[in-house]
Image: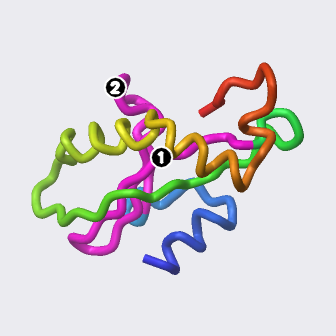
Amino acid sequence: MRSNMEVWVAGNNGPTTKFHGFPNDADHPHGFVLKHREHRLYGFLCHPRPKSSPSFQLCVLCIYAEKWGRYTDKAELDRVEEWLLISATVQAIGRLYPEYLGEGVKWKM
């Protein structure tokens, strides 16, 4: 998993066998999954520095699951969406990236 994450951190957008987002899923467009065999870490991507560095992305991994079938269980992505929207998550990100909570700045994902 760590080497797969290092590939993503280096700016690569693939291969999808190691990680990928869900940009075509209207209900979970910010979702992200990091993969290794049947192991999955689900989370979301956001832009916590919208003014000073709009291209900077933060990956917040929040759920571990095992996947044995072909398709992702949408319940896992629904749980990620819940994490993304709760105020505790917003506040935690804001502690590390104060710009994220800046006046007039909406959380840009």
Q: Residue 24 is drawn in which quadrant?
A: top left
Q: Amino acid at mark 1?
A: Phe
Going 53% across and 70% down the picture, which residue do you hit? 5
SS for tag 1?
Answer: strand
* Residue found at the very far top of the displayed protein: 104
Query: Where residue 101 is drawn, which disc sits there?
Result: none
Q: Residue at x 51, y 58 (%)?
A: 14
| Residue 53 percent coordinates (x, y) | 84, 43
Residue found at the very far bottom of the displayed protein: 3
Name the residue rendered at 70%, 43% in the picture. Answer: 48
Residue closest to the eye, 3 or 48: 48
The image position of residue 60, as x and y in percent, is: 51, 54
- Checking the image for residue 27, the label placed there is 2
| Part of the protein shown in magenta | 19-48
Residue at mark 2 to residue at mark 1: CA–CA distance: 12 Å
Residue beneath disc 1: 44
22 is within the stretch colored magenta? yes
Q: Amino acid at mark 2?
A: Asp
Q: Would residue 74 be found to the left or right of residue 105 on screen?
A: left
- 96 lies left or right of 6: right
Q: In terms of image quadrants, where is residue 68?
A: bottom left
> In the image, what residue occupies the spot 64% across and 30% down?
107
Looking at the rendered structure, the secondary structure element under dot 2 is loop
